[in-house]
Image: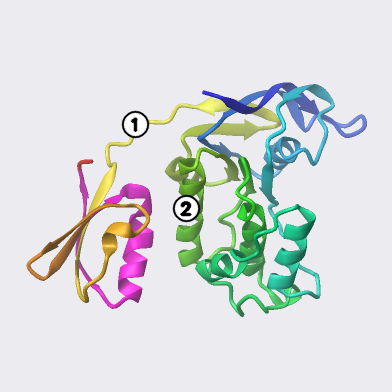
């Protein structure tokens, strides 16, 4: 696999203090999702800042400089400008000229107050949505997300999962952190653990459930084009969907919002 960026023996120390990172080796191939599990203070945010070229290593080597989209663990949302104005300003600074995708992306993330909401009025979760929009707008080669699910509502959780999958599908890579093992294993191809500044690989068990069968009853609709839907079959007033397991919650939420009733949810073979 082509490597986007590689860390070789990377360390980070502030002054004469205890090293924040020690002898970290990490290769980020194109088209992969890497999840880093660790508690607060373990060094995972520092690692992401080095990957994003926002902090310099004090030992070791970083090879590669992909185009990066970065979401910090806490988005600085104290500005007076609106979400739309902020994203337009940052897009222009970044050299990203197609501004037409800003409002659809904020609508997809269901930003409370819409594009004209002043940043300083937003909750942590809604500020996180604006930060996520900024990170993905330019379709970076490497999307770096620090605790991205923290504070998001249920629907935005599902949209974020879709964005991670879509980023991988177009051949880019994602590196994200979380302190919850279930969240990391649900979305990552490769899982690592950060503990006291040291990074180790975690073996990922092969998932037996690769798809979910969802049976709906309700109005007609074209479900075949929905993200994560492998197959949609009309069967005597029912719609039988075969859905990639990671997209099942998002599909169910959209079905309920559109007035469908859910008759069955069960694992199935691919």
Looking at the rendering, the stretch of residues picked out in magenta corresponds to 242-268
Specify the farthest residue to the left: 236
- Image point 73% across, 77% down: which residue? 118
Q: Residue at x 62, y 40 (%)?
A: 142
| Residue 125 sits above or below residue 209 on the image | below
> Dot 1: few (<14), some (14–19), or many (≥20) neighbours within 10 Å?
few
Is 55 in front, or is 203? 55
Residue 136 falls within the magenta-colored stretch: no
Q: Which residue is mark 2?
A: 161
Q: Are marks 1 and 2 in contact (CB under 8 Å)?
A: no
In this view, the residue in front, 17 or 158, is: 158
Cα gap from disc 1 to disc 2, whole angstroms? 19 Å
As drawn, the residue found furthest toward the front would be 97
Mark linked to residue 192: none
Circle nearer the N terminus (1, 2): 2
Quarter of the picture containing the C terminus is top left
Magenta stretch: includes residue 248: yes
* Picture quadrant of residue 21: top right
């Amino acid at each position: 696999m082509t490597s986007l960026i590689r860390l070789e023996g990377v360390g980070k120390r502030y002054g004469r203090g205890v090293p924040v990172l020690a002898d970290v080796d990490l290769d980020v191939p194109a088209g992969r999702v890497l999840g880093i599990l660790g508690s607060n203070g373990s060094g995972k945010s520092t690692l992401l800042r080095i990957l994003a070229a926002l902090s310099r290593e004090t030992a070791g080597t970083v090879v590669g400089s992909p185009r990066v989209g970065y979401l910090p663990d806490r988005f600085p949302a104290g500005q007076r400008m609106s979400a739309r104005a902020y994203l337009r300003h940052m897009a222009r600074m970044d050299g990203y000229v197609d501004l037409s995708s800003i409002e659809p992306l904020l609508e997809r993330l269901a930003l409370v107050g819409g594009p004209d909401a002043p940043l300083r009025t937003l909750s942590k979760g809604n500020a996180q949505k604006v930060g996520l929009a900024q990170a993905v707008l330019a379709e970076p080669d490497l999307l770096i997300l620090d605790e991205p699910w923290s504070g998001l509502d249920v629907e935005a959780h599902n949209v974020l999962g879709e964005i991670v999958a879509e980023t991988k599908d177009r051949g880019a890579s994602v590196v994200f952190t979380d302190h919850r093992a279930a969240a990391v294993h649900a979305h990552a191809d490769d899982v690592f653990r950060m503990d006291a500044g040291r990074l180790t690989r975690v073996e990922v068990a092969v998932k037996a459930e690769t798809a979910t069968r969802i049976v709906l009853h309700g109005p007609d609709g074209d479900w075949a084009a929905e993200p994560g839907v492998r197959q949609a079959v009309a069967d005597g007033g029912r719609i039988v969907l075969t859905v990639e397991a990671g997209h099942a919650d998002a599909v169910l939420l959209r079905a309920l919002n559109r007035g469908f009733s859910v008759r069955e949810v069960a694992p199935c073979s691919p």
